[in-house]
Amino acid sequence: NLGGSYKIAEKVGVTAGATLGMGRTMELTDDFGSEAGQFRPMDYQFNLGAAYRFVEWVSVGANVKYVGQKLFTDVRQGTVAADVFFMGEYKGIKATVGFNSLGGRVKDLAGRRWNIPSSLSFAAGYETVLWGAHGIEAELRGDYYFIEDKAVVNNPFCLSMGAAYSFKFITARLGYHYGAESSVMPSFGAAGLTLRIADIHIDAMYYIAKEGSPLKNNLSFGLGYSF
């Protein structure tokens, strides 16, 4: 993942980013059972966005993105989608509501067109600093997914909650995402640390999930710079 954002004057912000995900390498064989090389499936995304604060404590943002997959050697698919969100902040309380991944459609091998998973999302959180040194954050988020194939995914709701504690140059985080077995994203937990050195921050996150989940025992790292 690679991304950045920049504030213009006091009311406008712009952002850009890219994501690349690579799956496990697969050995290929031809019709006669002979080795035919290797293949690695990929997911990728590119996005551009902008936000405008139209009153002191409320802003609106829109993000346009191209998302794609390389599923097999000769099978690719991609589409353009958009996110639109409103955000408000007042005395440490933050709230967000909007839509994720609207408008994107892809075609399966049979030629049928499908909407990519999109959702109505809301989030609310609170952050403060106690005694001038102890930072506290907490957030609750919910998603309602618009599902086409109810036989595959019949639970459209997901719920996430998380909390963070900061002291000097260290932040510790804990979170949990709830999703039923048949929801878009199953349940998992996460624990992480952030280290800040001057304007650089280093992030690490460990994911906890059930046996068989692709998130089980995953460890991710991030590197950021604020200026």
Image (tube, rainbow, N blue to C red):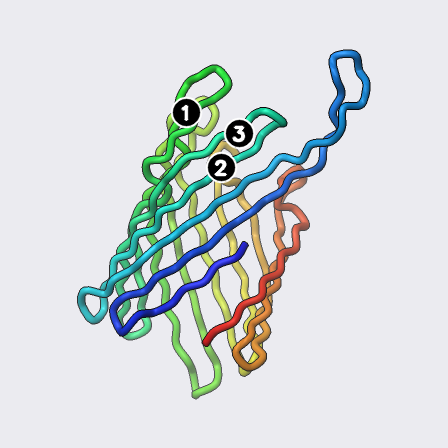
Compare marks 3 and 2 and give the one earlier in the sequence.
2
Horizontal side, residue 47 vs residue 54: left or right: right
- Residue that carries the numbered disc 2 in the rendered image: 68
- Residue that carries the numbered disc 1 in the rendered image: 150
- Residue that carries the numbered disc 3 in the rendered image: 76
Q: Amino acid at mark 2?
A: Gly
Measure the alpha-carbon separation of dots 2 and 1: 23 Å
Residue 151 image offset from top left, x and y in percent = 45, 22
Badge 1: how crowded within 10 Å, few (<14), some, or many (20+)? few
Q: Amino acid at mark 1?
A: Lys
Where's the C terminus, which quadrant?
A: bottom left
Measure the alpha-carbon separation of dots 3 and 2: 7 Å
Q: Amino acid at mark 3?
A: Arg
Looking at the image, the residue that sits furthest to the bottom is 132
Where's the N terminus, which quadrant?
A: bottom right
Q: Nearer the viewer, residue 70 or 151?
A: 70
Residue 52 image offset from top left, x and y in percent = 25, 62
